[in-house]
Image: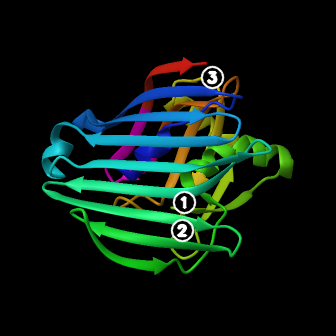
Amino acid sequence: MRYILLFLVAIFAYSKTMIATYDAKYGIFGTIATAKGVFEKNETNYVISTTSKAEGIAATLSKHMVQKYISKGIVKNGQLIPQTYISYRKKGDTTYKRVYVFDHKNRKIYRYKYKNGKFEIKETMPYYTPDDVLSLYFNLPYYFKKLGKRNLYVFYALGGRKSDGRVDVTFPSGDELKELKSTFKNAKGIYIKGNLYNKVFAGDKGILYLVIDPQNWVTVAGMVKNVLKIGNLKGKITSLKIKE
């Protein structure tokens, strides 16, 4: 389910609000999740929020799981700099909330844990990263321009590899790209491969594929391969609204 949030993308502009909705399908089970993302940005601040809900058989098996992720921060020289990242998960009658506070000056991230609305503990994360997974994705155009053309881009973001937040980004080519285009029915856009080193389902390797519209940097489709060693989890955009 956590990969659904990565199907939600943003448009970089001076001041805009973007609202996107997505469906995620899994083999013979059909739609197993729906997701909605809202991106708001002005000259100085931004807020990204995503919500995913289990549907159909997945809802029954997951006790109607709902997940929310929120990234808040400032905008500096075109770059999103997170100050707070919040993850929320509801499964049945139990809720889990994690609030991460970035201390960029001292290169630390603090985590506050809550269960069913009750504060449990404050911890210091064992590593520091300049991004969370939401701000990282939305910062990719900025980083690609800054770093120039490379075969492999290595980033560090909260929500990536558990030990240090590592996230790898590459551009598929050759047979891999050919296979992806066939899978996505030759959808037009930039094909990106992300490795989060963070397995979510038995059988998957934490690898996510995205197809991005280069005109506005909106993801039109995404996929996690070999979920549960049965099939691929695929997501695609169903609606997009942009408010100037």
Locate residue 58: give its quadrant: top left
Q: Earlier in the sequence, mark 2 or mark 3?
A: 2
Numbered label attached to residue 196 = 1
How many C-alpha atoms fall within 10 Å of the one at disc 2: few (<14), some, or many (≥20)? some
2 vs 3, front mark:
2
Give the magenta-colored segment's residue range: 224-235
Numbered label attached to residue 28 = none
Q: Position of residue 189 (x, y in %)?
A: 65, 27
How many C-alpha atoms fall within 10 Å of the one at disc 3: few (<14), some, or many (≥20)? few
Which residue carries the number 2 mark? Answer: 161
Q: Along the horizontal axis of the image, is 184 left or right of 141?
A: left
Question: Could you tell me if residue 228 is visible in this image?
Answer: no
Question: Could you tell me if residue 208 is visible in this image?
Answer: yes
Q: Position of residue 205 (x, y in %)?
A: 47, 60
Q: Nearer the viewer, residue 227 or 72?
A: 72
Which residue carries the number 3 mark? Answer: 188
Task: Give above or below for 239 relative to 109.
Answer: above
Identify the residue at image location x=41%, y=78%.
122
Distance from Cα at disc 2 to Cα at disc 3? 30 Å
How many C-alpha atoms fall within 10 Å of the one at disc 1: few (<14), some, or many (≥20)? many
Amino acid at circle 2: Arg
